[in-house]
Image (cartoon, grey):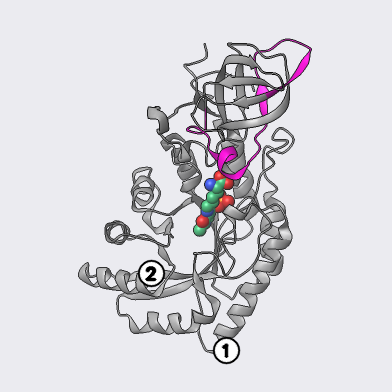
């Protein structure tokens, strides 16, 4: 029996296989540490599996720090970034003794120093540097260009490192970078490595030796052919860093992967409510909308959509749309599907990352439920 739609379905066997593939690639490098970027999906059942596999957590809010702790991630494997950390969020992180704050501005550094002093703590910080390296991906998810709001400008780096030395409750640990998301061209990461090498050379000349280098996340997945590439090419990804990044002795290298860990294990399962014909179009109106998966509306993202129940050989074209009162509530246009009828079940694939975590209650809808392969049997 299929539960009440819409809901997220998570293939935990694929998640485990993905985590094992990452663990295998980093095994030769004991100084590599992978932190799961919780913003991609903070579903407690997935977090439990990721935590048990030995991964750390990458957080962007006090709520995520707390969720990571609750899920059992060791505090000394938690990193925390974000341009606008509130005082209570900083305090949550300080009181839990997280591994490191990724600090994005001088005023933030000063506030962390003050709050750490009040708590009689020394806050470990990495400085998030805006490397001005272009990632070839959607404009809304590019983060490492000079015009983006993230990070400290390269030209200010020395000044800020000096400032960390003057602030008694701050300990400078290293540098943090993140150039964007859904990156499929490994040359973008080569460019990042080369930029990091240059920065390190300059710092070393001034006797500044970061102990932590964090290169963020961003590795992309195959949205067009999820069955051909259910697991991202982690070998190619980690090899870029092994070959191009000149780590210093005793330096640790940190990664913050989100999408590549969870995207392919999730599908949004939805039911066709109506098929509506107009002069020019045929709409398959489904019971999931941009409230459950906002990526198509927000980034013009394309997710593969399959009809799980139609047994008909004839194919027709459909615009697959949701029930929300917004013209942008469209999952795909002119999509060829086997003849689709009221009651059919569709799977919107590769929705494990930035699906459930970006869901909203717009139009007074309920947040989506989720089930795993242990709870319901769905063959996708
Ligand atoms: N580290 C930092 C500092 C980040 O800002 C992000 C993502 C990550 C790590 C993880 O990136 P990933 O490995 O998942 O690409 N909602 C958008 C993606 C936003 C990404 C935000 N930052 C989407 O649905 O495509």
Q: Is residue 183 left or right of residue 368?
A: right
Instruction: Give coordinates of residue 120: x percent, y percent.
Output: 22, 70
Residue at screen point 39% across, 79% down: 164
The one of 367 and 219 positioned closer to us in this rendering: 367
Residue at screen point 48% across, 36% down: 356
* In magenta segment, residue 216: no
Residue 255 position by quadrant: bottom right
Instruction: Give coordinates of residue 298: x percent, y percent.
Output: 56, 43
Pointer 2: what residue? 124
**Is residue 258 visible from the viewing direction of this image?**
no
Dot 2 or dot 1: first in sequence order is: 2
Name the element at disc 1. helix
Residue 367 position by quadrant: top left
Pointer 1: what residue? 205
Name the element at disc 2. strand
* Residues shaded magenta: 289-318
Instruction: Give coordinates of residue 177: x percent, y percent.
Output: 55, 65
**Is residue 193 visible from the viewing direction of this image?**
yes
């Amino acid at each position: 029996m299929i539960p009440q739609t819409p809901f997220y379905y998570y293939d935990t066997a694929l998640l485990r296989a993905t985590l094992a593939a990452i663990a295998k690639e980093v095994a030769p490098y004991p100084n590599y540490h992978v932190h799961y970027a919780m913003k991609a999906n903070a579903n407690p059942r997935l977090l439990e599996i990721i935590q048990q596999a030995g991964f750390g957590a990458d957080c962007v809010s006090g709520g995520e720090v707390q969720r990571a702790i609750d899920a059992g991630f060791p505090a000394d494997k938690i990193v925390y970034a974000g341009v606008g950390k509130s005082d209570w969020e900083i305090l949550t992180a300080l009181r839990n003794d997280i591994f490191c704050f990724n600090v994005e501005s001088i005023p933030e550094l000063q506030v962390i120093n003050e709050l750490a002093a009040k708590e009689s703590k020394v806050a470990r910080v990495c400085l998030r540097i805006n490397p001005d390296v272009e990632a070839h991906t959607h404009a809304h998810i590019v983060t490492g260009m000079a015009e983006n709001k993230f990070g400290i400008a390269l030209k200010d780096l020395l000044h800020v490192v000096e400032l960390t030395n003057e602030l008694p409750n701050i300990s400078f640990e290293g540098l943090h970078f993140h150039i964007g998301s859904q990156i499929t061209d490994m040359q973008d990461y080569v460019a990042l490595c080369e930029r990091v090498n240059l920065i390190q050379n300059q710092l070393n000349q001034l006797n500044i030796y970061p102990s932590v280098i964090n290169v963020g996340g961003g590795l992309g997945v195959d949205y067009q052919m999820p069955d051909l590439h259910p697991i991202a090419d982690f070998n190619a990804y980690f090899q870029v860093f092994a070959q191009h990044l000149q780590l210093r002795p005793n330096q640790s290298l940190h990664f913050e992967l989100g999408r590549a860990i969870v995207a392919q294990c999730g599908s949004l399962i939805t039911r066709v409510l109506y098929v509506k014909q107009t002069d020019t179009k045929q709409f398959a109106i489904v019971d999931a909308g941009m409230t459950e998966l906002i990526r198509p509306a927000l980034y013009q993202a394309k997710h593969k959509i399959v009809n799980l129940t139609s047994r008909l050989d004839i194919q027709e074209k459909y615009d697959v749309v949701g029930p929300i009162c917004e013209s942008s509530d469209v999952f795909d246009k002119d999509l060829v599907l086997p003849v689709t009828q009221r009651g059919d079940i569709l799977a919107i694939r590769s929705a494990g990352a930035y699906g459930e975590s970006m869901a909203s209650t717009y139009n007074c809808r309920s947040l989506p439920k989720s089930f795993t392969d242990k709870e319901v049997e769905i063959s996708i």
